[in-house]
Every structure is written in C-alpha cells, then in structure tokens.
Amino acid sequence: MFNLNKVMLAGNLTRDPQVRFLSNEQAVANFGIAINRRFKGNDGQVKEEVTFVDIETWGRTAELAGQFLTKGKLVYLEGRLKLDKWDEADGSKRSKLKVVADSIQFLSPKSDGGSRSQQDDGATGGDASGDSATGVQENRTNAERAQPLASGTLSAGDEPPF
C-alpha cells in the first residue's frame, strides 16, 4: 500500500519562533504561519481567506529559525503532517494537527540593517534544512556554483543575508 505525507506551504509568520532545548540538547522551534488565498466568489466579488497553520521544526533548522525568523517574515517550507493527541485535566480528549517542517527557505527580502554591505535586491533567502551536516543545504546546480552567490542566497557556512 502506498502512503504519502508531504506538505509544501508558503506564508508569513504569525509569531516569532519559540525555541527550546530538550535534555539531550536538541532544539525544537514552534511558530505559526498565515497563508492567504484570494478567489472570486459566486457573486463575482474577490474574497480573501486566511488559513493559520502551526509549525514545528527540529535540530539545526529550529536553531536557524529562532535566530533569523521573526513575525511577518515570508517563508516556504516542506514537511509532513503530525497529529498530537492529549487528555485534558477534565478528562476530555484533545487533538491538534500541525506541520513538522524538514526544511525552511527564508523568502523575505533583507531588511535595511546597519551592517549590510550588499545592496538589497529582494532576492530570496537560503534553505535551512536539517538534512545536511551543517544544517544549511546548498541547492544550487553545478552551473550556478560557478557563478557568485546572489546577495539573497545562503550557502553552507554563510550567515543568512537579512
């Protein structure tokens, strides 16, 4: 039997990531994103719908999210759905569906910070993935590697450009 649990989302952070470290020193970050959808209703009017999604990420990706993401930043993430279940003090059963992000790309343009040496060109940010040893995954082809990095691209060992 074939099973698939894959989520791809892009949206704006609704709150700053909350990072905590477990007893084994592994980081976990929790934050939310808002995903906007515009569509024409049956009456021909443009309507907007907002979906709020809770996100959890682990390891180096969680550390980078806590360090560089803030409320309002635009991100693209890939991960999987996870259902948390628990019992309330009154005996009622509760559950909540969330996304566990395996990789996050910072999409917001760099802010006008004081120590920036490159001009802001609005390029997209880099990938903070827990899949590589450094926690930063380089997703460039060989041809792209021959070219200098754009000011908004993050490669292994670099600091995010915003």
Image: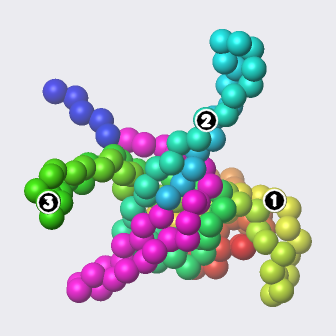
Q: In the rendered view of the protein, which quadrant contains the N terminus? A: top left
In the image, 157 versus 63, the foreground residue is: 63
Span highlighted in magenta in the image: 6-31
Q: Please say if the residues under marks 3 and 2 sit with CB atoms less than 8 Å apart.
A: no
Crowdedness of circle 1 by 10 Å Cα count: few (<14), some, many (20+)? few
In this image, 127 relative to 40: left or right? left
In this image, 31 relative to 1: left or right? right
| Residue type, numbered disc 2 | Glu
First in residue order: circle 1 vs circle 2 = 2
Q: Which residue is mark 1?
A: 122
Q: Which residue is mark 2?
A: 49
For the stretch drawn in magenta, what is the main secondary structure? Answer: strand
**Position above or below: 53 against 109:** above
In this image, 71 relative to 59: left or right? right
Q: In the rendered view of the protein, which quadrant contains the C terminus? A: bottom right
Q: Single out the mark in the foreground, 3 or 1.
A: 3
Q: Which residue is mark 3?
A: 90
* Residue 59 picture location, percent across and down: 37, 73
